[in-house]
């Protein structure tokens, strides 16, 4: 019977530990630069050096913007009047495996993808009000103007870049149709 109690305690402990790992207390990034009024979902003001945690929502007010540096080297620059939530961020620095899901609810966000996307583009997902997109080794901008219209622009790099970088590739979907964007400067719009 003692063996069963120890086993049950171990199972309960492991479940509790894994739940704690998925909590909002996991540090996943930092504000590299903040100008103006930037806050999180708790209305805490975010300034240069403020930590970003799993599950945080970052909100920029008018005439404000911020740059967020994540542990996998992904960089997000959020423009004014923007709301973005980090729905998922899992990263293992030893093998660069992980998953990054963000939700651009409104506003403008520029993404420079990091190790998670370079390893496997399916592991970086950006939710927008009218669809989703995945990205590989690239730089792109998402503009969510309303609940039913979003624009995505691929910035690069192109397939024949002189730096030897992985060519940029975006896969944009409205839930029914998907398109690939592989040429820098091209944009696509998704509407409901």
Image: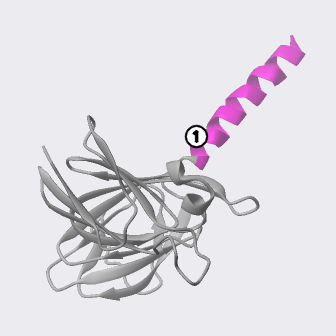
Q: Residue at x 34, y 58 (%)?
A: 85
- The single residue placed furthest to the front in the displayed view is 160
Q: Quadrant of residue 164?
A: bottom right
Front residue (pair 70, 128): 128
Q: Residue at x 55, y 46 (%)?
A: 22
Does any portion of residue 119 appear in the rendered image? yes
Q: Quadrant of residue 192?
A: top left
Front residue (pair 181, 67): 181
Q: Residue at x 83, y 15 (%)?
A: 4
Disc 1 packing (10 Å; few <14; some 14–19; many ≥20): few
Q: Is residue 35 magenta?
A: no
Front residue (pair 84, 177): 177
Q: Is residue 150 above or below residue 30?
A: above
Residue 78 point in image, percent of width and height: 30, 75
In this rendering, position of residue 22 left or right of residue 61: right
Q: Residue at x 59, y 46 (%)?
A: 20
Magenta-colored segment: predominant secondary structure? helix
In this rendering, position of residue 17 left or right of residue 77: right
Q: Is residue 174 above or below residue 153?
A: above
Q: Is residue 41 above or below residue 1?
A: below
Does any portion of residue 23 appear in the rendered image? no
Residue 57 point in image, percent of width and height: 33, 61
The residue tagged 1 is 19
Q: Quadrant of residue 18?
A: top right
Residue 112 point in image, percent of width and height: 45, 73
Residue numbers of the magenta segment: 1-21
Q: Is residue 5 magenta?
A: yes
Front residue (pair 18, 161): 161
């Amino acid at each position: 019977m003692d063996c069963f109690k120890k086993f049950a305690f171990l199972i309960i402990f492991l479940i509790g530990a894994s739940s704690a790992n998925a909590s909002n207390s996991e540090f996943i990034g930092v504000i590299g630069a903040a100008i103006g009024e930037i806050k999180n979902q708790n209305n805490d003001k975010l300034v240069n050096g403020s930590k970003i945690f799993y599950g945080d929502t970052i909100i920029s007010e008018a005439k404000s913007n911020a740059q967020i540096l994540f542990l996998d080297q992904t960089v997000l620059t959020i423009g004014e009047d923007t709301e973005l939530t980090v729905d998922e961020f899992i990263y293992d620095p030893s093998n660069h495996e992980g998953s990054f899901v963000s939700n651009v609810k409104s506003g403008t966000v520029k993404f420079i993808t990091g190790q998670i996307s370079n390893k496997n583009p399916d592991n970086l997902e950006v939710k927008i009000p009218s669809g989703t997109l995945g990205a590989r080794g690239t730089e792109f901008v998402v503009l969510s103007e309303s609940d039913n219209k979003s624009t995505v622009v691929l910035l690069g790099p192109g397939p024949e870049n002189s730096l030897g970088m992985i060519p940029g590739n975006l896969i944009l979907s409205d839930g029914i149709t998907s398109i690939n964007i592989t040429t820098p400067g091209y944009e696509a719009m998704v509407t409901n």
